[in-house]
Amino acid sequence: MTLTGHNYIAGEKSAEGGELFYSVDPRTKARGELAFHSATESEVARAAEAALVAHQQMRGIASARIADLLDEIAAQIGALGDELLHTADRETGLGLPRLTGERDRTTGQMRAFAELLREGAYLRAIINSGQPTIRQMQFPVGPVAIFAASNFPFAFAVAGGDSASALAAGCPIVVKAHPGHPATSELFAQAMTAAVSAQGFPAGTFSMLQGAGIDVGQWLVAHEAIEAVGFTGSLRGGRAIFDAAAARPRPIPVYAEMGSVNPVVITQAALAARAEAIAAGLVGSVTLGSGQFCTNPGLILLEDSAASQQFIRAVSAKMEAAPAGVLLNEAVAAGLENAVSQTQANPQIELLTGGEASGGQAFCYRNTVLQTRAAAIRADSGLQTEHFGPVTLFVLCEDAADLRATINGLEGNLTSTLHAEADEAVDDLLGLLREKAGRVIWNDFPTGVAVVPAMQHGGPYPATTAPATTSVGTNAIYRFMRPIAFQNVPDALLPAPLQDANPLGILRMVDGEYSQAPLG
Amino acid sequence: MTLTGHNYIAGEKSAEGGELFYSVDPRTKARGELAFHSATESEVARAAEAALVAHQQMRGIASARIADLLDEIAAQIGALGDELLHTADRETGLGLPRLTGERDRTTGQMRAFAELLREGAYLRAIINSGQPTIRQMQFPVGPVAIFAASNFPFAFAVAGGDSASALAAGCPIVVKAHPGHPATSELFAQAMTAAVSAQGFPAGTFSMLQGAGIDVGQWLVAHEAIEAVGFTGSLRGGRAIFDAAAARPRPIPVYAEMGSVNPVVITQAALAARAEAIAAGLVGSVTLGSGQFCTNPGLILLEDSAASQQFIRAVSAKMEAAPAGVLLNEAVAAGLENAVSQTQANPQIELLTGGEASGGQAFCYRNTVLQTRAAAIRADSGLQTEHFGPVTLFVLCEDAADLRATINGLEGNLTSTLHAEADEAVDDLLGLLREKAGRVIWNDFPTGVAVVPAMQHGGPYPATTAPATTSVGTNAIYRFMRPIAFQNVPDALLPAPLQDANPLGILRMVDGEYSQAPLG
């Protein structure tokens, strides 16, 4: 494919702006040759307005047609071939094996949504046949703005989970690409644009805007045509978008996934039974993808004991021995250095290994282990700040009560994990951990998010701005739909899923009973 | 029952504050004798903290026990007997027949949620039995603040729909009572307190705070323990609460239902077929409850014609002939006078009847009909402001295109209505009206909201702050729940609804199939 450095607005390339930026190879810090154009305010407006036109043109479209579009996108992504992998590897340093797997996940989630749409129960059709007759189902909210993440250049980016779920909902999307991988983003934009055209969708169904700074995103969120926002990134970035959306004359919802420290509690019995296996699993999870996962285990809570201290020494040794991975880009490297420095400024923090950038020509940070006591983290909530990289903080608790009090003082997280033995009385621990997260994990590690309907990738603030929603799994579609009820509307004027005959044969709740049968 | 004028905080009466206010009979403007104490900041904090303790104590409670509480509340409300009706009638002027019906609706919705809880499918249990096994269901979010409305002293107040759905979700509630009916609120507080105690729930499960001004609400929304807010009232009040919640260090969702103008479109064919019936239905709907309904039809769109003009004259005559109803209180009367004056300040507005307070000793406003042309409402969005009372505004459109453009320019509403004939081509009209509302009504009137699962009482901003949710019907429960997923958690440690054996026999989605069967 030929890369241009342009924005993709409703099927057209556009490069109005004079603000340019470039790819940087994180392994060499070498700048790419192609200049990418940050979108201008008028380009942002054009994309949003085209999305609104597309929304109006797509009114009443059948779910099956949207399913075809999602399958086509998956095929077009596949057709990008190895160029996609090599381009992304050059821009992110994530390596071909990981990127190959992530590509499968990305096309897989497109196809999973296509399947959901063809099945039809997701519309949550409800019919009450009394007088008056009321029928409801879910409809697309309208144009959605999506902010791509840096750490998943495929699965949480231009054609990632937010895009898949918003398109599946029937919403046109305007994607703000992440400046860390603009060439990769352009390849995806080409695939999406081709798919939209091939399936005969309105051109405004998809636009992709490049942007090095925060302006493009702020213009996009403020645009009157935008009805909802999907965001994956930092707490600071997500909160800024959330605040801008809430301050609009007409506020809109922001579904921001902003990472977390993902507390892990390990009981003494678990340590006694399998300290070595837990240490190995933990180090693998902390260093996976150079620690650049939203679900990275960044806070480990243990009761203080000789066994706990030995465990921490073992983890530190393994972390020291593990090779330091490449970080995504300069911003991540600088942010990590800054976050660890701020944590170390607390005199209660002890550095066990790492704590600095590793030398060499790549963006790289040593695998880092910090340690403190529970009283310190309860006194300073700043110690719950995510270190986005291969860093974890051990927290030693005085006793079981101190452990529980510390869990109770935790902020919201995407996940919480308990390593314990099956015969321990840990009901209350699990109950406390449940309050703090969207996913509770038993004797396993939080990295690795299964893309299945039961997955919940969300959690109380500051992990997300909308804990009742998920950004992974098919339920992610409901962020971009709203129910509409029809009162007394004649059958011929109803959407097919609500008609008496149930022509699509979908599961509906009719007068309190779930059924795929026609009415009456 | 003995009324005290106190706040009810976790089972205890409390009257710390020196700010006093009184009931006023809207029929006579006479002030009641009992002084009600606005809650203080420390009373608000006590209620919120007790709710948090209750939330912790209720962790893991069975749905069936909550169902018993809801049934008990319904019984306790019934036990208040006629005193409730007479007290509310004195404070609101709504009349005994209406209040009797509203009481049935209020106890009915408590029992409907109890039934939902016993049935169990509402938990949306999802199980994926792969490796790892992921299971999710819905859990209560925690303490909920509820702001009662003035216009439904039973159904949207202390024991109204927001309270019923939040309690059903398993959340403790702190209700800010509406100052328009403090004695009625105290009776409900006594019933709720008795029910909580009789069913052995933690005292903090329910608190009720009185307050004449905005301080109590602002303190409540800002309190760290509060996790979500339910609100029914004005746009100005709802937006203030929304803004305060969004500006918290940890933002929380606000589910505010803020009323709307509920556009009604009438085609020429419908007028030709049944102008008189539509006029009668419309006048009934506009004047119902003295026009003090969120779903009051406040904006009527017609193509200009002799038939339309004759229809408007007929409606005006009927409105003039209908007796002026009593308004709820001085604030509603003053607000209505102000809103109509502001609308009349637009030179494009023509007053056909009413437009002033009616004399006499009651709070009362003449049934009012205004008229303008479509160009005026497109030029001035202020003309879409709700007049909370027996007022409607006719909008004459030049032709079919002008009608469609005007609909397209409408803000969000709770409902939109189309009166048309079955053989007309109105697909596109219905499509446009759908975009502007949560409920689309065919040849019927928007007042009267059926409390059924298919009901959607919500809509795009400014009708609500959360168009994907409803405040009427059993789906209202999802405003106060969030999903939590469990990964690899052993059966014995799982909540019963997620256990292999499905001990509650509820409907679950297991590996993509809906089933009530045990696993495996």
Image (cartoon, coloured by chain):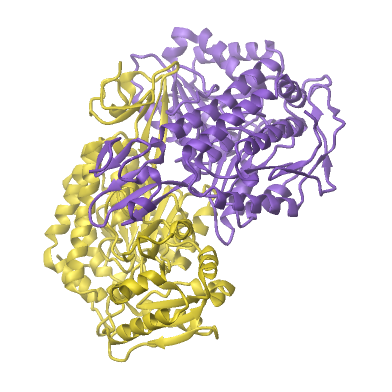
Chain colours: A purple, B yellow
**Residue A260 visible, this angle:** no
Which residue is the extreme one toward the right?
A33
In the visual, does B362 lie left or right of B429?
left
Which residue occupies the foreground of this view, A32 or A490? A490
User: On screen, B45 above or below B267?
Assistant: above
Quadrant containing the N terminus of chain A in the rendered view: top right
User: On screen, B228 above or below B327?
Assistant: above
In the visual, does A178 lie left or right of B467?
right
- Identify the residue at horizontal 81%, vertical 36% (top origin): A4
Q: Quadrant of residue B135?
A: top left
**Residue A451 visible, this angle:** yes
Which residue is the extreme one toward the bottom?
B359
- Identify the residue at horizontal 37%, vertical 30% (top origin): A431
Q: Quadrant of residue A383?
A: top right
Quadrant containing the C terminus of chain A in the rendered view: top left
Which residue occupies the foreground of this view, B316 or A402? B316
- Identify the residue at horizontal 48%, vertical 86% (top origin): B350
Indicate the position of residue B47 as horizontal and vertical percent values: 35, 53
Indicate the position of residue B372 as horizontal and vertical percent values: 49, 80
User: On screen, A359 above or below B470?
Assistant: above
Which residue is the extreme one toward the front?
B423
Number of marks: 0
In the visual, does B114 lie left or right of B148?
left
Indicate the position of residue B259 as horizontal and vertical percent values: 41, 65
Q: Quadrant of residue A76?
A: top right
Which residue occupies the foreground of this view, A493 or B149? A493
Indicate the position of residue B237 as horizontal and vertical percent values: 45, 66
